[in-house]
Image: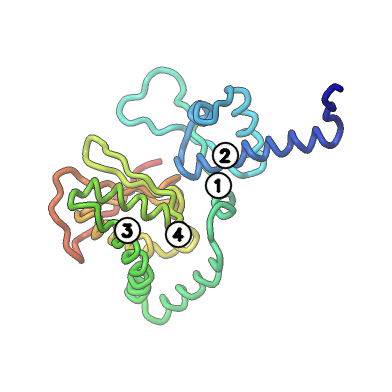
């Protein structure tokens, strides 16, 4: 007896489920990696250029991703620069836990009116103290090397929902957070980003530079860890450097 042939609505439902599954995988990759080219996405998912383009076109039409020219370090070669794709803020909201954003923003506005910017900063510092304690406990066996600690911190932050990773680059190390649970609120109150960056500095044990943040429209929160650092103490300065998109 021959196997039944799936036709009609059953076949359509299976095709739609497969499309949705692939789209979810594209979304997850963009959440984890930030700005990514179509070729890189296709290679990671084992999809042809035409197939990945079809998914990206659908996501562009639905407002889930946007495209921009790839930033090239140093001189630019011939030809047009490749496009990179990033998740829109609406898509990030669906991926993360942005509950009570409106209430949090309203509360911080009240604090700012009542106590000024310093009061907002004090509130932000208190809010990240619990995160710092949990990450420090998770990094207990990481040793003293700042880059090794950054790798351990990336794992701890990923467990907290930040989709983080650490890499070694020519000038030291780089900690990237591909998701920010408070991006909406931090867009108005940068003290939240500043408090988080100070936590990163204390946890890796060195002065760091925050190069980019999701709250300011970048695809990824990027923190640079310089080579041959000196041991940071609580309260050491933290530098925020804005890089052009």
- The quadrant in which the N terminus is found is top right
Q: Which residue is mark 1?
A: 88
Identity of the residue drawn at 46% across and 51% down:
179
Q: Give the Cα separation between the discs numbered 1 and 2.
A: 16 Å
Asked whether the beta carbons under mark 1 and mark 4 sit within 8 Å of each other, the answer is no
98 vs 133, nearest the viewer: 133
Mark 1 vs 2, N-terminal side: 2
Discs 4/3, front? 3
Q: Which residue is mark 2?
A: 25
Q: Which residue is mark 3?
A: 138
Above/below status of 1 relative to 158: above
Circle number at residue 187 = 4
Asked whether the beta carbons under mark 1 and mark 3 sit within 8 Å of each other, the answer is no
Asked whether the beta carbons under mark 1 and mark 2 sit within 8 Å of each other, the answer is no
Discs 1/2, front? 2
Mark 4 vs 3, N-terminal side: 3
Give the secondary structure at mark 1. loop
Above/below status of 229 relative to 130: above
Q: Give the Cα separation between the discs numbered 4 and 2.
A: 27 Å
Q: Where's residue 232, x and y in %?
A: 17, 58
Q: Give the Cα separation between the discs numbered 1 and 3.
A: 31 Å
Identity of the residue drawn at 32% across and 25% down:
75
Q: Where's residue 76, x and y in %?
A: 36, 24
Q: Where's residue 237, x and y in %?
A: 20, 60
Discs 2/3, front? 3
Asked whether the beta carbons under mark 2 and mark 3 sit within 8 Å of each other, the answer is no
Mark 2 vs 3, N-terminal side: 2
- The quadrant in which the C terminus is found is top left
Discs 4/2, front? 2
Identity of the residue drawn at 24% across and 54% down:
141
């Amino acid at each position: 007896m021959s196997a039944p042939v799936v036709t009609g609505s059953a076949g359509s439902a299976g095709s739609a489920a497969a499309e949705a599954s692939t789209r979810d995988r594209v979304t997850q990759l963009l959440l984890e990696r930030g700005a990514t080219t179509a070729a890189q996405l296709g290679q990671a998912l084992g999809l042809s250029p035409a197939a990945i383009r079809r998914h990206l076109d659908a996501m562009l039409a639905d407002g889930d991703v946007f495209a921009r020219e790839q930033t090239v370090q140093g001189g630019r070669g011939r030809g047009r620069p490749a496009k990179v794709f990033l998740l829109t803020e609406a898509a990030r909201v669906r991926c993360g836990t942005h509950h009570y954003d409106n209430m949090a923003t309203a509360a911080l506005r009240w604090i700012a009116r009542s106590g000024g910017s310093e009061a907002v900063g004090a509130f932000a510092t208190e809010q990240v103290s619990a995160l710092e304690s949990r990450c420090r406990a998770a990094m207990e066996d990481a040793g003293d090397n700042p880059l090794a600690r950054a790798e351990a911190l990336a794992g701890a932050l990923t467990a907290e929902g930040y989709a983080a990773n650490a890499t070694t680059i020519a000038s030291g190390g780089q900690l990237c957070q591909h998701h920010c649970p408070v991006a909406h609120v931090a867009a108005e109150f940068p003290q939240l980003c500043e408090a988080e960056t100070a936590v990163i500095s204390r946890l890796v044990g060195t002065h760091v530079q925050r190069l980019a943040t999701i709250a300011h429209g970048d695809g990824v929160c990027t923190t640079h860890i310089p080579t041959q650092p000196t041991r940071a103490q609580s309260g050491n300065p933290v530098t925020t450097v804005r890089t052009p998109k």
